Image (cartoon, rainbow, N blue to C red):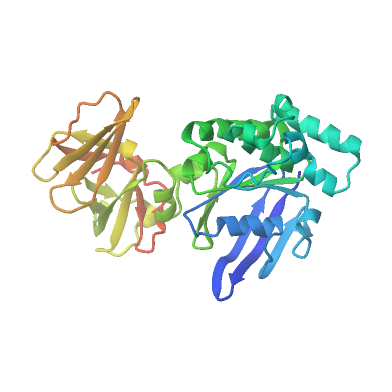
Amino acid sequence: MASVTLNKVNKLFGRDHIINDIDLHIGDGEFVVFVGPSGCGKSTLLRLIAGLESISDGDLCIDETVVNDLPPRERGVGMVFQSYALYPHMTVYDNMAFGLKLAKATKETVHERVMATAKILQLEELLHRKPKALSGGQRQRVAMGRAMAREPRILLFDEPLSNLDASLRVQMRNEIARLHNRLGSTMIYVTHDQVEAMTLADKIVVLNGGHVEQVGSPHELYQRPATKFVAGFIGSPTMNFMPAELLAGDANGCRVRAAGIGELALPQNAQQRQSGEALTLGIRPEHLCLAAPTDDNCFDIVNVEYLGNEVYVYLEPKQGDTLLIHRSEAPSQWREGQQVSLAADWEKVHLFDENGAALMLSTQQAAA
């Protein structure tokens, strides 16, 4: 096991600044997930740690040793790629042993490590097979086993489940989580799927345009997003956003108004904002409440999605085009074509300024 520290790490391809001044510490034994949209730099960052790309500026340390100039084989890392990259003419045993043989390990060491890894991954009955005789999930376990057999200090995963169907993805997520619990090794995992990030990670690193937007546990990112980007990216379905306006202060302090759902008193740490400032109010679908429509609070139900244990209700205001989502347990009384009013759980509301920064982590205020 090992820790990884990045100090002001940058990566440029020509004039394109792909990774920009990233500071990050990954503790010994942590399971850390890099998540973000396509092109945000997460795979490039993983390749920098692996040594497959050179760092343009900054320092990368493994256990406090700067490894910028070390080749991949000397960094003590093992990598599982999006493609299984198994040798089709080799058996499972030979695929898993290949890296050890290249490292000139003894025959006894090769056999011992392959068998130990096969037991962990439940591949013992498949060692004689070739990749064409394996399912997608089994091939992915062999790819993981090939990396693990070398006993790396750090295991790196680059979108390893993206080629699997939905049921296999769930199965493999569970197997990877169990593997981490058994080994206790440091694991760094790249995905664009925030569900994978939420279910696997001890710590999530949200990347956007080569920058780190926020680092924290799944609970922290879901409950206290630092930016509008994080709030919209983490959570399924996504957070609802609607325009809001800061009202002039009175004897009761400053307030903010969101069209259709009322006013919110701001906490003391947000009292210095300018009256009339345009803000964005964010609220999770499960924190919206529906009721009978009123003259100044009326939304049309444009679609209802039944998912078995829960229902998504899609809402559109009478004027404007802001589509909102309400989530509730099934069964639901709401039907397409109905009109409703909205209320919010104000203690769960988030506010963001014009730059997308969170105005406060939680209002902790009651509605007017």
| The N terminus: image quadrant | top right
Q: Is residue 306 above or below residue 353?
A: above
Q: Residue lying farthest left?
A: 295
- Viewer can see residue 270: yes
Q: State the quadrant of the C terminus.
A: top left
From this view, report whether residue 315 is shown above or below residue 66: above
Q: Quadrant of residue 184?
A: top right
Which residue extends farthest bottom?
15
| 272 displayed left or right of 114 | left
Q: Residue at x 59, y 43 (%)?
A: 160
Residue 144 lies, in percent from the top left, at: 68, 39
Asked where in the image residue 284 lies, by quadrant, the reply is top left
Measured as percent of width and height from the top left, residue 217 is found at 55, 43
**Residue 351 location in percent, x, y?**
35, 52
> At which x and y percent is residue 201?
57, 41
Residue at point 40%, 46% (across, down) = 362
Marks counted in the figure total 0
Using the image as rendered, state which of residue 58 and residue 353 is in the foreground: 58
Q: Residue at x 10, y 40 (%)?
A: 294
In this rendering, would 28 be left or right of 364?
A: right
Name the residue furthest front.
89
The residue that appears at 48% across and 44% down in the rendered structure is: 194
